[in-house]
Image: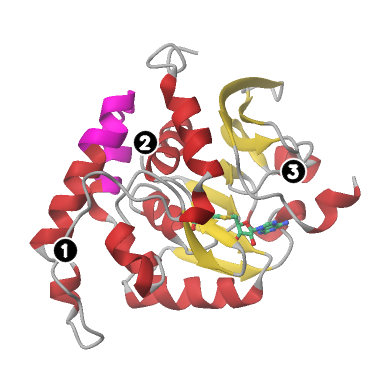
Amino acid sequence: MSKMSKPLIVPLLFLSLLSNQECKQKSTQKPQPSPQTKESSLASEYSDNWQKLREAMVKNQIEARGVSDPLALTAMRKVPRHLFVPEKERSESYNDYPLPIGKGQTISQPYIVAFMTEQLGLKGGEKVLEIGTGSGYQAAVLAEIAAQVYSIEIICELADSAAARLKNLGYKNISVRCGDGYQGWPEAHPFDAIIVTAAPGKIPRPLIEQLKPGGKMIIPVGNFSQELILVSKLANGKVEQKSVLPVRFVPMRGESEKR
Ligand code: SAH
């Protein structure tokens, strides 16, 4: 819980920002990236202005709150978050809150993406499963570190657009599938790490089963009030859980709602 002992305002801030997520809260330091046109080349999508916004995001929102894993920070500095949100949200894409991505879903706050990535303790070369592809942003961050990322999204339209986006950006180590993530991805298991970005009422058993001994899973659990739970499967197969942060994610749909 050392993370929690940093500023107590972090989870509170996060909760208050989330509760405001529909009202498009404006940042005090509104970024002014250069206007992007549909025709803009990939090179300009990675332009200096966006890079500067990413640097500021990492420094002020992520490092300032105690995330220090160099692999997670490097990935957050690299992935072009503005290309994972609808065009009208782009100017806000590096701000300190989640944003709508369509179909009633959201891309998580940058700090939460970095925090969850750090909790997995990746060193490079792992096989990772994500439940809740959404925009594909978290999958891209993971793919900067891991060898292979498998990601499942229950809304097929989001799965298709995320898969196309990730392909356009050149990610070759991410497989996206449309379906209910409750059952995990049996053909590809076991996984070194599992990340869940929609909240079930309780942890789906198949996900625990598909975790490798020595592996970690980070998952928001709960209905209205949720906790981010870090699940560790020890080398002897024993499973330990600890609560690391209060959060607010969209609910996990499908099978999990019947349990
Ligand atoms: N990780 C995403 C944000 C996720 S929002 C990103 O980086 O953009 C949570 C997503 O989980 C939503 O897109 C929602 O449709 C999806 N979801 C909800 N229940 C699910 C389930 N049972 N299986 C797979 N995806 C699910």
**Is disc 3 placed on a helix, strand or loop?**
loop
Residue 154 spot, x, y in % from top left: 69, 65
View extreme (bottom): residue? 39
The correct choice, above or below, for 10 with respect to 5 in the image is below
Q: Mark 2: which amino acid?
A: Lys
Q: Residues within 10 Å of mark 3 (few under 14, many from 20)?
A: many
Q: Earlier in the sequence, mark 1 or mark 3?
A: 1
Q: Mark 3: which amino acid?
A: Pro
Q: Mark 1: which amino acid?
A: Pro
The correct choice, above or below, for 256 with respect to 16 in the image is below
Write down the residue under mark 1. Answer: 33
Q: Residue at x 57, y 72 (%)?
A: 158
Residue extent of the magenta highlight:
59-76
Q: Residues within 10 Å of mark 2 (few under 14, many from 20)?
A: few
Write down the residue under mark 2. Answer: 123
Is label 2 in contact with label 3 (beta carbons under 8 Å)?
no
Pick the front one: 190 or 7 = 7
Write down the residue under mark 3. Answer: 200
- In space, the residues marked 2 and 3 are separated at their CA atoms by 28 Å
Q: Residue at x 48, y 71 (%)?
A: 162
Instruction: Say whether residue 210 is left or right of residue 193.
Output: right
Q: Is residue 63 magenta?
A: yes
Q: Earlier in the sequence, mark 2 or mark 3?
A: 2
